Image (cartoon, rainbow, N blue to C red):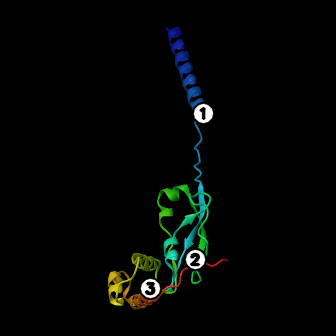
Amino acid sequence: MGEIDRSWIFVVAGLAFFLALTIRNRKKFVQPKTIFYARRIEGFQVIAFLHPQMSAACLADHGMQFGQGFRRKEGPPLPHDSLCRCRTAAFSVTSTEAFHGALRQPRAPDLTLDELTSREAQSLFECLRGVQGSPPETPELYLAKQDLNRFSPEHRTRVEFFLRERYEFLKAPQPPAQPTQA
């Protein structure tokens, strides 16, 4: 019987040795973690400067993105006219940020009212863009079309004054637009 017990010991020891080698070899062939490198998207964006005498072209081109990674490779010729103060700004986002909506949110426009927040500046831009064609007959009707309640109370009077200036500019006879050559 002593002979049979020894053979069982050798069989169990052989299995343990085989399992130890198998586990050790599995650790060697585990794939290393792959590092994900997000592709960077670089381009330019047109940023309008909001002032009461700005042209419709400035309003239309604000937020336009262009560059190598975009369908539009070249931006609009700047300045749009003699009163244009639009500029281009470079930006760079990763493909992951673009997937999550970073390219859908244009930068806030620059404006003469320095104390407005970027959200209020965007709201003022939407007010100006919302009036297409000829303005209403009176400044009160023009202001009634705008929702001035979206501006903070301390800025509301300045925004109202800005919009009244814009109304006067829109009602004045406009010379034919001729782009300036830079």
Q: Which residue is mark 2?
A: 80
Q: Which badge, 2 or 1, is on the more N-terminal residue?
A: 1
Q: Which badge, 1 or 3, is on the more N-terminal residue?
A: 1
Q: Check residue 141 in the rendering and tell me which mark sits there, or answer none.
A: none
Q: Which residue is mark 1?
A: 29
The amino acid marked with disc number 2 is: His
Q: Nearer the viewer, mark 2 or mark 1?
A: 2
* Looking at the image, residue 105 lies above or below residue 69: below
Q: Give residue 6's position: percent from left, percent from top.
A: 54, 13
Front residue of 80/97: it is: 80
Instruction: Identify the residue at image location x=38%, y=83%.
Output: 135
Q: Distance from label 3 to label 2 (Cα)? A: 17 Å
Front residue of 142/150: it is: 142
Q: Check residue 170 in the rendering and tell me which mark sits there, or answer none.
A: 3
Q: Counting other residues with Cα less than 10 Å from the Cα at mark 1, is it few (<14), some (14-19), or many (20 or more)?
A: few
As drawn, the residue found furthest toward the right would be: 182
Q: Distance from label 2 to label 1 (Cα)? A: 62 Å
Q: Give residue 170's position: percent from left, percent from top.
A: 44, 85
